[in-house]
Amino acid sequence: MSAYNEAVRHYTIKMMSGFAKFNCLVCKHSVTTREFSSQNGSCRTQAARAMNEHAAVAHGRPLPFSPRVAQAWSVR
């Protein structure tokens, strides 16, 4: 498993009937795509962001980002 994959595995995703449920790997915290509005973009992306922020705040895990994003930030 690559370092990138290890960094982003803060949650699991379970497909339900018409929505996805994101579960924290460390605690019982979860969110569903129903909690977010498609008017703000992809509900899956919003749920994933919420889970990554939860992992950072509640468990001290680093916010993940791909090497591609890191490269874009370092070029600026």
Image (cartoon, rainbow, N blue to C red):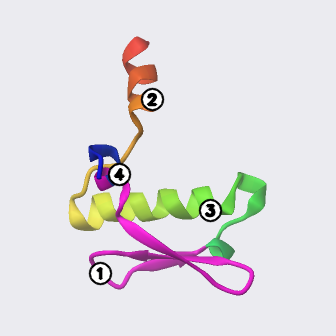
Badge number at residue 44 = 3
Which comes before the other along the chain, label 2 or label 3? 3
Residue located 65% across and 85% down the image: 16
Residue at point 78%, 56% (across, down): 39
Q: Type of residue at label 4? A: Asn
Badge 4: residue crowd in 10 Å (few <14, some 14–19, many ≥20): few
Location of the C terminus by quadrant is top left
Report helix, strand or loop for mark 4: helix
- Specify the label residue 27 is tagged with: 1
Among numbered discs 1 and 3, the one appearing first in the sequence: 1
Q: Earlier in the sequence, mark 1 or mark 2?
A: 1
Of 30 and 13, the residue lying toward us: 13
Of tags 1 and 2, the one toward the viewer is 2
How far is disc 4 from disc 2 in space, using C-alphas?
13 Å
Q: Nearer the viewer, residue 21 or 49?
A: 21
Distance from disc 1 to disc 3, alpha carbons, whole Å, reads 20 Å
- In the image, the segment drawn in magenta is 6-32
Front of the two marks 4 and 3: 4
Residue located farthest toward the front when viewing the structure as drawn:
1
Q: Which residue is mark 4?
A: 5
- Element carrying mark 2: helix
Q: Earlier in the sequence, mark 4 or mark 3?
A: 4
Secondary-structure class at tag 1: loop
Report which residue position mark 2 lands on.
Answer: 68
Q: Reply yes or no: does residue 20 show up in magenta.
A: yes
Q: CA distance from mark 4 to mark 3?
A: 18 Å
